[in-house]
């Protein structure tokens, strides 16, 4: 019974285009690589989860539990094997005011509702809309996120305790100086050198893991007095316990948490889907957007009931995993389980790891994440694309990822519309088939942005009695285009002249009222659908095809 139920669920996933877990690529060598990559990721997850918990003003274990649960669930059912999810700063900054005003229990309820919204997005396959994000926006996204990751490491160059007391902000902490700063920089540099040089000699062990291990051994062996993971907070704890958020189940609670849930769901999905595309480019895989929405939603619903702060995909840890050789679900699964082991039994050991080693790993992630080629192509691409790259990068750093992507998409869409609006033009000639008639051959798309120029192409007063408008090389896109054709027909009708419309699509025949009577059918009429549905009787436009 259980097996048949699971099979039916799997069939439904397949019907929706959602891939099932692929366990065909597990070889002994790949298993070893995935386990070591997972261990590396888990070590890098600890300070990140603790830092984001500080940002959200919640207990460090709330961030660690979120990293474990979200990472575990998305590793099992996510849309892209090898991608890492956990507690993130993009979500943490949204939570700050909610926790400050209403408390952590409202945060847990918000995370549950956030997960439900993400589940709905996956069920209705809204993940496919990520394809509307242009490539310049993607470049700005990775560049901005690389800068954000870099700036996030700056807090590790402050005297332990001062950054946390100031809300983990750079302005409130006291910067290192003298020998402590020199030692910190030296260890960061050593870690980066190991990560860069080791792959030239061997790939038996992931370079980031080797860097962490060697630097940790140097620090512990020589008893160097440098900041360590334990200086941030203790990560010791037990298993996460099931807990229904202690909030009133009424409409007032919904009014409080719904806005936060919606924003967090949107931010989480945007960051996750963009990371999914980025990892897909590195691993040569595509698809899985809707499945990733379902996985993120499921993970956040569960983590909300187990005392976690919610999460989404983490580009930094995903890059560590992929570049360490992690390619299957085992790498993400092992990262989550290693993290849980650190919490349960390995906290005393993990707390001894120097922060400099983890900073060095993240600095190498920054170098690998930043799209350096975008700097080289700036002068060779259209000015609008270059402006979008810079704009999205800046907004990501100054505000947040979701705002940056939305702004980038809007600016790109406006630039596209403007460029297409300028493309419409006309070729005028006398008709061969109809003696005495004048032909206007329209070239370029006819839509809301080009209707004014379209109207300026014609000369009703000076045209002969018969005028033919040929749309063979044009495309009628929206209702504004239909209205422009109707207006043109009225102008010629008012002058007592005959207007013929040729090569309009069949759906235009149906949607045009006055001008529809003037259409001359041809065997080579185009066949496409408009994005509107027009009722001749009511004159009302609605969403359609």
Image (cartoon, rainbow, N blue to C red):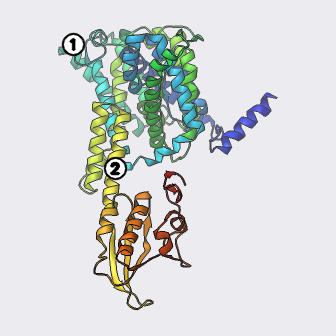
Give the secondary structure at mark 2: helix
**Residue in the picture at 42% in, 76% down:** 470
Left or right: residue 399 compared with residue 95:
left
Nearer-N-terminus badge (1/2): 1
Quadrant location of the C terminus in the rendered image: bottom right
**Picture coordinates of residue 477 (x, y %)?**
44, 61
Give the secondary structure at mark 1: loop
**Residue in the picture at 25% in, 54% down:** 383
| Residue beneath disc 1 | 174
**Residue 332 appears in view:** no
| Residue beneath disc 2 | 412
| Quadrant position of residue 99 | top left
**Picture coordinates of residue 78 (x, y %)?**
57, 34
Q: Nearer the viewer, residue 46 or 7?
A: 7
**Residue in the picture at 31% in, 57% down:** 418
**Picture coordinates of residue 320 (x, y %)?**
44, 32
**Picture coordinates of residue 268 (x, y %)?**
46, 31
């Amino acid at each position: 019974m259980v097996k048949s139920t699971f099979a039916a669920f799997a069939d439904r996933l397949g019907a929706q285009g959602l891939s099932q877990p692929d366990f065909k690529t597990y070889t002994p060598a790949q298993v070893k690589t995935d386990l070591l990559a997972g261990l590396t990721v888990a070590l890098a997850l600890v300070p990140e989860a603790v830092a984001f918990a500080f940002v959200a003003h919640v207990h460090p274990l709330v961030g660690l539990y979120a990293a474990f649960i979200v990472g575990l669930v998305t590793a099992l059912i996510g849309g892209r094997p090898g991608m890492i999810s956990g507690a993130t700063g993009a979500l943490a900054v949204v939570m700050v005011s909610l926790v400050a005003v209403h408390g952590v229990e409202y945060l847990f309820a918000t995370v549950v509702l956030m997960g439900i919204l993400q589940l709905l997005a996956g069920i209705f396959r809204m993940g496919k809309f990520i394809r509307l994000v242009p490539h310049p926006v993607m470049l700005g996204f990775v560049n901005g996120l690389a800068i954000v990751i870099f700036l996030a490491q700056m807090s590790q160059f402050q005297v332990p305790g001062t950054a946390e007391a100031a809300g983990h902000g750079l302005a409130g902490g006291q910067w290192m100086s003298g020998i402590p700063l020199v030692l910190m920089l030296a260890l960061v540099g050593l870690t980066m050198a190991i990560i860069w040089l080791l792959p030239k000699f061997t790939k038996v062990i992931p370079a980031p893991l080797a860097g962490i291990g060697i630097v940790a051994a140097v620090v512990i062996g020589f008893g160097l007095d440098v900041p360590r993971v334990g200086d941030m907070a203790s990560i010791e704890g037990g298993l996460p316990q099931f807990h229904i958020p202690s909030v009133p189940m009424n409409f007032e609670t919904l009014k409080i948490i719904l806005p936060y849930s919606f924003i967090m769901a949107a931010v989480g999905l945007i960051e996750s889907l963009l990371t999914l595309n980025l990892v897909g480019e590195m691993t040569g895989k595509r698809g899985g957007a809707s499945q990733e929405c379902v996985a993120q939603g499921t993970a956040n619903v569960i983590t909300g009931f187990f005392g976690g702060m919610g999460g989404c995909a983490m580009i930094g840890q995903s890059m560590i995993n992929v570049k360490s050789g992690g390619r299957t679900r085992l790498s993400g699964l092992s990262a989550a389980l290693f993290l849980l082991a650190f919490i349960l039994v390995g906290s005393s050991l993990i707390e001894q790891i120097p922060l400099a080693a983890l900073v060095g790993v993240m600095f190498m992630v920054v170098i690998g994440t930043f799209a350096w080629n975008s700097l080289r192509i700036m002068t060779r691409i259209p000015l609008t694309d270059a402006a979008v790259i810079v704009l999205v990068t800046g907004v990501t750093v100054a505000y947040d990822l979701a705002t940056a992507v939305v702004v980038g998409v809007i600016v790109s869409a406006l630039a596209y519309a403007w460029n297409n609006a300028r493309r419409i033009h006309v070729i005028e000639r006398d008709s061969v088939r109809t003696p005495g008639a004048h032909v206007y051959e329209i070239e370029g798309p006819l839509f809301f942005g080009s209707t004014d120029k379209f109207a300026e192409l014609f000369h009703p007063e000076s045209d002969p009695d018969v005028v033919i408008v040929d749309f063979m090389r044009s495309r009628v896109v929206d209702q504004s285009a239909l209205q422009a054709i109707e207006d043109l027909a009225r102008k010629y009708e008012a002058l007592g002249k005959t207007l013929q419309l040729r090569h309009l699509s069949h759906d235009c025949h149906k949607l045009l009222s006055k001008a529809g009577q003037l259409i001359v059918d041809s065997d080579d009429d185009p066949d496409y659908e408009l994005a509107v549905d027009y009722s001749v009787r009511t004159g009302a436009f609605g969403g359609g095809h």
